[in-house]
Amino acid sequence: MTQKDDLTKKPVNVDDILKVDLYDVEETPHISVNFDRCIGCETKPCIDLCPAKCYDLLGGKVLFSYSGCLECGTCRIVCPQNAISWNYPRSGKGIQYRFT
Amino acid sequence: MSTEHSTPNASPSTNRFDAIVVGAGPAGSSASFTLARKGFKVLMIDRGRRAGTKNMYGGRVYSEPLEAIFPSLRKDAPVHRWVKAERLSFVSDEGLTSIEYRGGESKSFTTYLPELVNWMRAKAEEAGALVATEVRVDRLVVEKEKVIGVQAGPDTVYADTVIDAEGVNRLLLEGAWQMNVPRQEDLAIGLKETIKLDAERVNQRFGLEDEGMAWILLGSVTRYIPGGAFVYTNRDSVSIGLVLFLSHAVKRTNGHISRLLEDFRLHPKLKHLWRDGELLEYSAKLVPEYWRGFMPRRLSGAGLLVVGDAAGVLLNNGMTIRGVDLAAYSGYLAAETFTKAHAEGDFTSEMLSAYGRRVEESFIGRELRKHNGLEYIRRNPHFFDQYPRLVNSGLGRIFNIGLESPTIWKALRGAQKDVGPDAWTAIKDMYKIGRTL
Amino acid sequence: MQILVGIKWVPNTSNVRFDPKTGALIREGVPSIVNPHDLDAVEFALDLRDRYGGEVNALSMAPPSAIEGLEQVLGMGVDSAILVSDRIYGGADTLATSYVLAHAVKRISNQRGKLDLVIFGQETIDSSTAHIAAQTASWLDLPYLYYVRSVEIKENGFIAVERWLEDEKTIYDLPLPAVLGVAMKSREPRPVRLIYKIRAKAEKPIEIVTNEILKLNPNCVGLKGSPTWVSKIDYTPEVKRKREVFMDPDAGKAAKWLMQKYADEDINLIGGAHR
């Protein structure tokens, strides 16, 4: 997302949208995923429901990256496999909201 | 050589409090402020770098409950705009129909929640509360079924009562009460973009003179997924977002959820309102949607009071969304209950259960119960689909006149045949709505 | 060990916006934070204290809002903090800043009767000059090493300091007191602890030092004492990511593909890896 992109012209990739957010990323992930449990998961709702697109599909496998996490907790609720061990970051790290 | 620093000196003055409040959001800050003002030794702990950095909401706060807690609100709170314009729109592929109300008096305002929460935190701190930010509480410490303190990393701190204001993801409560993870059916997901526009443009485009607009939109803006879209005008920005019932969103987003918000932002009939704006922030939050399902069976236990989102005190009836003020007031009621318990020197579950009754008897309980009937609307997805289309299709027939205009009855009947529910369902729905209202 | 750690209170530049017309940095909504590399230095100092005992104190020259940052490092376990704060110190370049810091260090050293190490982060995220440690050492006439990864106390009152450069690792014996610049990301800073944070708030172990106390010549500090000026700022254009993914169980193939990509983009890896 650059300032010159017109927000009202065309869709912006969510990865670019997330660039406007301010983070202080903790070095140790605050969420961990048991990917073994994703193998049998048919619906994988995390992929489309995580607002920060922390979950992605690559070759049929779930990839997880915690750095853009907005700490909303949606993945924990929608995961049908109970595969997500969820917590908040420590020590003031993570998303730093200012304008919401 | 010395290792004296491996264990910090946890003197009684620093590890024992009258009350510990977990979370410095609207509920926690209100509880802390109220307690500190009465002279109690209060510790408020927050996981954010500073209070407010983890808070997100739709965009409007009802002021009266807050003014009851913070008397100086109208004087020094970081208010962006007092809301004097209310708009409700039904959006569908057929068109867009709005009703708008503009009154003189304003009882709600827009702001950035991180700013407001940090102001509340400052009030609590000025009143004497000790605020420890950057600390994530890991566990409520329970001994003989009584909460006696909190644990954060290697440290434990004790209090007569812990006020749990941890928010919608109530990990601590789940741990202490062995509760299940909340159900999708009881939650909604909120997404929002804050778009910078100078104040003059906000005024021009929304027809305002430095006052605020709150705008709810139903229908195609959520791709007919039950929920709604919102627009709030801030001082020099607009907040645009969606609230989607999670159980429906899981089945029906059909692609990444952020695309729904993009579609809203790019809506041909709306996008001119934020043209040339600059994206300031993208945020998301879970919302306790169906309080009857989400609220814990009890709001207190021995040494424990549950407030705010963790308690599920949030109202969304489609037109009115009240979270911040209800949360704050629940924090205030918890503080009042603690005060009484402290006077009696009794922090048992019986004593603290007065808090749950206070919530029920207050406007919070009355509001939640009153709007419970609207469950029918929210549980019937065709309200978010067929009725917006019916309205637009009907009005389209009335206003888009060729040679001869139809009677209103014919227009509506035609629209109903085209897009609406069958007549019997419509009659049933009208009856239910009438009864509820 | 008596250790002093330098802390800079900086705008969080990991996400800044620029005024499209003037090109100036927009400060609205840009919170200040403790320079992240200084947290590495704090961790380094606390680790020394864990192993050898003593005290770690933080030193910062900043406006009063920096108290928030000092509370963070106190929350990590730092014993006390000194905030050097005066309007006339404002607008300082690295020379004027290190001049003030050096005098503050002297004062602390005199007060406590002993000071073994002054530790700084490798550089700051808002200006990246890496001047301050060297200049402070120079004003104080103390030995100085940078890119430091570890320190051991030796029997003879010396310390063994390990410094890593890109292609070499050197161990120096250094007499105390000394000034060190800690290599960035040499270890993960410990999280803030509840007990320490409560102590920081309850006991407020932050001393505020103004120029009435330091009594420095106003011509040597702040804007007046700063010979540096910024003549122009250019912004590098944002590079759009290509989001290419190569999938193959054979790591060798993946590595080759990656190296080819670097070659295609004319990216020269250190050591000429794509030859």
Image (cartoon, coloured by chain):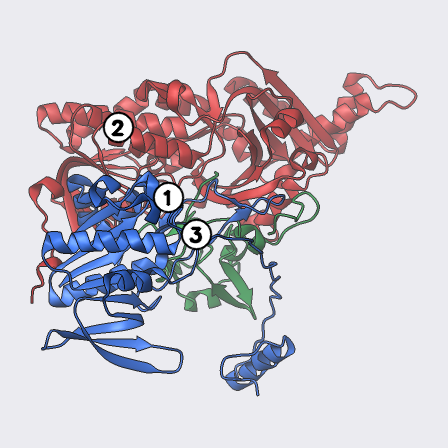
Q: Chain of mark 1?
A: C
Point 49% across, 16% down: residue: B106
Three-letter amino acid code at the position of disc 3: Tyr
Q: Which numbered tag is attached to residue B389? A: none
Mark 3 = which residue? Answer: A23
Rounded to the nearest whole Å, what is the CA distance between mark 2 and mark 3? 29 Å
Indicate the colour of chain C. Answer: blue
Q: Residues within 10 Å of mark 3 (few under 14, many from 20)?
A: many
SS state under label 1 = loop
Three-letter amino acid code at the position of disc 2: Phe
Between B404 and A71, the residue placed more toward the observer is: A71
Q: Is the residue at mark 1 from the same chain as the one at mark 2? A: no
SS state under label 3 = strand
Chain shown in red: B
Mark 1 = which residue? Answer: C90
Q: Chain of mark 2?
A: B
Name the image quarter holding residue A27: bottom left
Q: Give the image location of residue B323, x and y in percent.
A: 42, 30
Front position among marks 2 and 3: 3
Callout 1 touching callout 2 (CB < 8 Å): no
Rounded to the nearest whole Å, what is the CA distance between mark 1 and mark 3? 28 Å
Q: Chain of mark 3?
A: A
